[in-house]
Image (cartoon, rainbow, N blue to C red):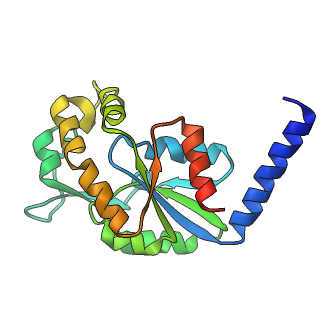
Amino acid sequence: MGKKKLVRDVSKLYNCFMHVSKKSSKVLITGVSGAGKSTICKQLKDMGYNAFDIEGIKGLFGMYHKGTKQIFVNYDNSNPNHVKNSEWICDANRLKNLLDSKKSKISFYCGIASNMDDIIKFFDKVIVLRPDPEILNERLKNREGSDDIGNTQEGRDIVLGWKDWWEDQMVKKGSILVDANTSTKKVADSIINLLT
């Protein structure tokens, strides 16, 4: 890479950051299982942004049984019956307190919850990662041997079965779709470009 190109790239990144930082935004990046939320979160961190995998924050989420509304004891994410009868609930009050405590001009929060309506109101923008079904199936398939929903084709079919409907519902609520079929860096750049 030539010195002039490097200076231009650094200058472009700086200008982009300064433009974004003037806005003070809280951005939720979401998507179905396998869409790339955790991967994009890591990429944004590597690019120097504040990015948080909210599903990994202890005590912020809980798995509840749809029927009883109680904590789902012995929940198994690789068991399709458990997946169909559970809800991944985010504690909206705790999330709001977390968001209010962050003082950076722009922060990305990555995750999904069954109670999205309770939490999307806290964000300035909601971005939905949208991979094609074939790519999503392959990503989930790579999780075989784990305790993940992608462990079996039956589990993958559950995700693929509600993917399009869920994404369409999120768009109706004002979310922005981002093509999640390309490289991690390109997806992250697309997200940053939406904020400039």
Q: Camera-side residue: 134 or 95?
A: 134
Tell me residue 176's x, y (percent).
45, 60
In the visual, does 65 lie left or right of 150?
left
Q: Residue at x 29, y 29 (%)?
A: 146
Tell me residue 110's x, y (percent).
46, 54
Q: Residue at x 54, y 38 (%)?
A: 184
Q: Does the rendering let one see residue 94?
A: no
In the visual, does 146 lie left or right of 80?
right
**Vertical comparison of 5 with 104: above or below:** above
Q: Camera-side residue: 160 or 86?
A: 160
Tell me residue 145's x, y (percent).
28, 24
Find residue 33 and report its image quarter.
top left
In the visual, does 185 lie left or right of 90?
right
**Vertical comparison of 59 with 36: above or below:** below
Tell me residue 43's x, y (percent).
58, 42
Q: Camera-side residue: 66 or 14?
A: 14
Looking at the rendered image, the quarter that the C terminus falls into is bottom right
